[in-house]
Amino acid sequence: MAVQKNKTLGEFIIENQSEFQYSSGELSRLINSIRLAAKVVNHEVNKAGLVDIIGQAGEVNVQGEDQQKLDVFANETFIKTLTNREIVCGIASEEEEDFITIQGRNGQNENKYVVLIDPLDGSSNIDVNVSVGTIFSIYRRVTPAGTPVTLEDFLQPGKRQVAAGYIIYGTSTMIVYTTGHGVNGFTLNPALGTYYLSHPNMCFPKDGKIYSVNEGNYVHFPQGIKDYIKYCQKEEDDRPYTSRYIGSLVSDVHRNMIKGGIYIYPNTSKDPKGKLRLLYECNPMAFLIEQAGGQASDGYRRILDIEPKTLHQRTPFIGGSATMVEKAEYFMGLYPQSEG
Ligand code: AHM
Ligand code: MG
């Protein structure tokens, strides 16, 4: 795929529409809606530092409007945008216990796609002005079009995703997404409200020197991960590696994709299934990582092969530069897999 710089996201979506297997413009419209909702969320996230001036969540601000917590705001913004435009037939969100069925105005919704979303991941970072992100995952429904969606439409293994991406609300705001033809990143020009193709064809370096893990939990980690961390810290060859952990999945993976590195959130003795959610955190990140030439694993198997059982299922997650993930899997493989 030939990509050129200074192209806007809108132009890119239209030009690449024919790449989709069942192209009807529906997926393009869906990505377009996510792009619009992301602008609204971005505007709100950028005001977060003014909270002492305009009021805390739950208070009424000077305009007489209720202040909302940003994760609630992001959730409502994405759901409203996708629902009002009748672009999808169902949505699952980290913020909602059950999936949402979108009936359509006349009760007939012929749309093919479901979206799974983490509207504002890492939101505890907002209070300290550290980057947060939105993560989304898109599937074709498996039940017939025109009928209400069922859980089956959402519980699909990650390898069936048709598109996935994240928005990073960082020093600049970016949308990074894939439709299974590589990964492209677009940076928002806030003055114009336009996203420009700034990172065409993003690729994980095959190997890297950054490891990202919450080492405070070290004593609770499986022995394979402890061994891998010791390997990263050993003075040998090009090691010790550098440790970088923001505690914001999108930001940690984004940095590692650009610089080369590995992100790890293992199962622990406290959280035997890990912390991260399979369907709207790990699967979309794993799809992006693989499309960028990296690997994503739960320590023993490919994330995208896991058959989900529940909407909010958790999984251990190891993702990043291929050589590093293979090494971590090697250490995990030295010990039997604990029952999670
Ligand atoms: P959240 O969905 O509650 O925001 O949690 C997910 C976040 C990830 O972005 C981040 O990588 C991880 O939790 C950090 O967890 P910890 O503070 O345990 O290291
Ligand atoms: Mg989250």
Image (spheres, rainbow, N blue to C red):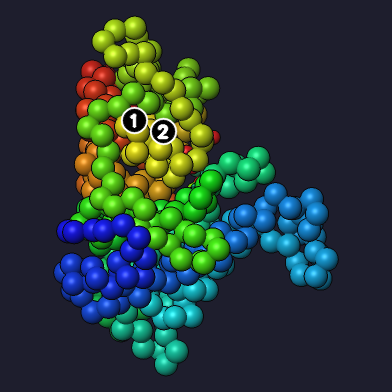
Cα–Cα gap, marks 1 and 2? 14 Å
Return the residue at label 2: 265
Under circle 2, the secondary element is strand
Q: Is residue 166 visible?
A: yes
Left or right of 82 in this view: 72: right
Q: Nearer the viewer, residue 280 or 174?
A: 174
Q: Quadrant of the C terminus?
A: top left
Using the image, determine if residue 19 lies above or below residue 165.
Answer: below
- Packing grade of label 2 (10 A; few <14, some 14-19, many >=20) is many
Left or right of 15 in this view: 314: right
Using the image, determine if residue 153 lies above or below residue 182.
Answer: below
Return the residue at label 1: 261
* Of labels 1 and 2, the one closer to you: 1
Q: Quadrant of the N terminus?
A: bottom left
Q: Residue at x 23, y 58 (%)?
A: 3
Q: Residue at x 62, y 46 (%)?
A: 126
Q: What mark, if any, has residue 110 been given in the picture?
A: none
- Packing grade of label 1 (10 A; few <14, some 14-19, many >=20) is many
Q: Is mark 2 within 8 Å of ligand 1?
A: yes
Which amino acid does the dot numbered 2 rest on? Tyr
Using the image, determine if residue 220 lies above or below residue 76.
Answer: above
Q: Which of the 4 quarters of the picture holds residue 140?
A: bottom left
Q: Residue at x 58, y 47 (%)?
A: 123
Which amino acid does the dot numbered 1 rest on? Gly
